[in-house]
Image (tube, rainbow, N blue to C red):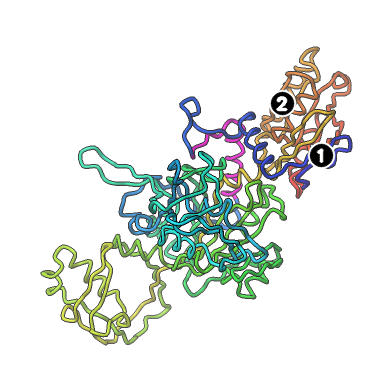
Amino acid sequence: MARAGAERRAKDVLKPLTGAERYAAVVDLAARRGFFAPSAEIYGGLAGFFDYGPMGALMLRKIQQAWLDYWTRNEGFFVVDTPTIGPEGVFRASGHLEKFTDPEVECRQCGEPYRLDQVMQDKVFVYPDRFDELHYYLTVDFDKEPQYVEAASVAKLNHREIRKQIMGSGKAVIGFKCPKCGSVEYEFVRPARLMLETSIGTQRPLVAYLRPETAQGIFWSFPALLRHNRGRVPFGVAQLGLGYRNEIAPRNALYRMREFHMAEVEVFVHPERKTWPRFKEVEAIEATFLAKDGAIHLATFGEMVRSGVVRSEAVGHFVACAYEIVRSLGMPDEKMRLRQHMPDEMAHYAEDCWDLELDTSLGWIECAGIADRGCYDLTRHQEYSGADMSVFVPYDEPRTVEVDALVPDFRALGPRFKAEAAAVGEAVKAASPSALRADGSLVVKAGGKEYTIEPALFKRQKRTEKKTGDSFVPHVVEPSFGLDRIFFALMDAAISRVEKEDEPYTILSLSPKVAPSLVCVFPLMPKDGLDDLAIKLSGELTAAGLSPSYDDAGSIGKRYARADEAGVPWCITVDYDSLKDKAATLRHRDTQVQERLPLTAILARLRELLKSPSGGA
């Protein structure tokens, strides 16, 4: 599908938009035409929050529905809807309470806060040919005269190492001009917690948090979901919903928000069987991959999995799914790439992680992340809650096996650990003898706490027993999407501007799959029965589920312009000839080709266009 249909208009003069101009054009159009705008503007606004207007809400719903349909129809995954608020224990187990922070710096002159990577990324470092080699401008301590250091003379340091330098030495970053006061000097303040805290109840309120991701609701529901799937893996669970992050400096419209729309899938797989039966359906798809060793590959998903750069078939499959979903919404291939996380970016428990990045007026932005999270999430919730998160796989026949086990002495544990004795004892039973320390003691986790168990409180015992099956905690492959960023990137890729008869003219070439309105119906004049005929046609299209817009205000040229700017793929005009020949003119947004069709044939033609591979645009 042509992304800039304006290029195909022979009489129109294309006006290329720079990144800043394109961003400004998107934000302006979004506010004027009801796509999105800052929230609570009559009260001065609320940074990081946006309202989706009549057009934007429809477009967002289409993106959400396309995402959901993909997972339910193609993969047969379950769908859940869990609360946006969770008790403190959930986020203690998930690690968010301890680790979900961003380093905050502030301008030395006016005190304006910024994220450290924002100050660094916007002006201070750039991506050279090898995208993982970051060059920085640094300065010495504030007590001395600031010194600019040329990028070429700075050692190639990764983001985490630079952060340690600045946070540990009290040095400032030079190069990013504070938008508020113009200063270029900053200093580290603190690691800022990103979760929004609330409370539940009135008499003895419980501490709770607004979820920073939708995933935890799926993890705490795992035992019930496993029962729903009759105790078998693999299976996947999808969830759409709001997430909340108390960003230090939300910015760039929908790019960094404090309330945002997330769409996540948790796929539970056997730890030793990370294949996927439907991978053969996506392995021939070609994409651009930026691997963690700095190499850039234009390759198929099958080639990347077979080469080992993508660590498993399951990860490769779901990276391909993310790529296909966003491409199906109208994102051009040349504006998409897949970037593998560097070793220092990945969590210690992650085995592989890829970001789907989109090229926009803001640069390359992450819109989805696909990670092999191992068994970290379920294991943590098992440790902190005491719930069994394992899967039991029965043998065909019972087997006699030799077991090397640790047996807790509950009589001795009782006086030592009191109320926690039962949980500690179960943790000892679940521990492997290989975890014993040199002095014979054992360290276990129970109820979110760590305990050292002396050798006198348990014994090691070898025995034979009959086993009816094996148990394991599943691993999780997680495709996670930021829908607001996808929404913005689709508008950003679709917008173009031409000079039409010496007047600026904006076209939003959205795919019919996401366009808020598919078709507009116009009477050439709102009189002489043309309006009646147009209203009747609009009603027929409404009954067929196409939800047309009706417009009879202003000249026909202005109505076409309004429709093009709102991303409407097709317009139908009823004119005076229509009263005689019972036909109307169907106009295509991206080519301006016009077809004269019988009124009775218009619905079939629109359905034909919608079924075409390009979505008819």
- Which dot marks residue 14? 1
Q: Residues within 10 Å of mark 1 (few under 14, many from 20)?
A: some
**Magenta segment range?**
48-69
User: Which residue sits at x=69%, y=27%?
Assistant: 549
Vertical order, 503 against 98 (above or below): above
Q: Amino acid at mark 1?
A: Leu
Residue 61 in percent (x, y) is at: 58, 40
Q: Distance between the Cα atoms at labels 1 and 2? A: 33 Å
User: Which residue sits at x=47%, y=72%?
Assistant: 271
**In this rendering, would 471 be left or right of 321?**
left
Residue 435 in percent (x, y) is at: 31, 80
Q: Provide the secondary structure element on which disc 1 rests.
A: strand
Residue identifier under label 2: 538
Q: In the rendered image, which quarter is residue 316 located in? A: bottom right
- Which dot marks residue 405? none
Q: Residues within 10 Å of mark 2 (few under 14, many from 20)?
A: many
Q: Provide the secondary structure element on which disc 2 rests.
A: helix
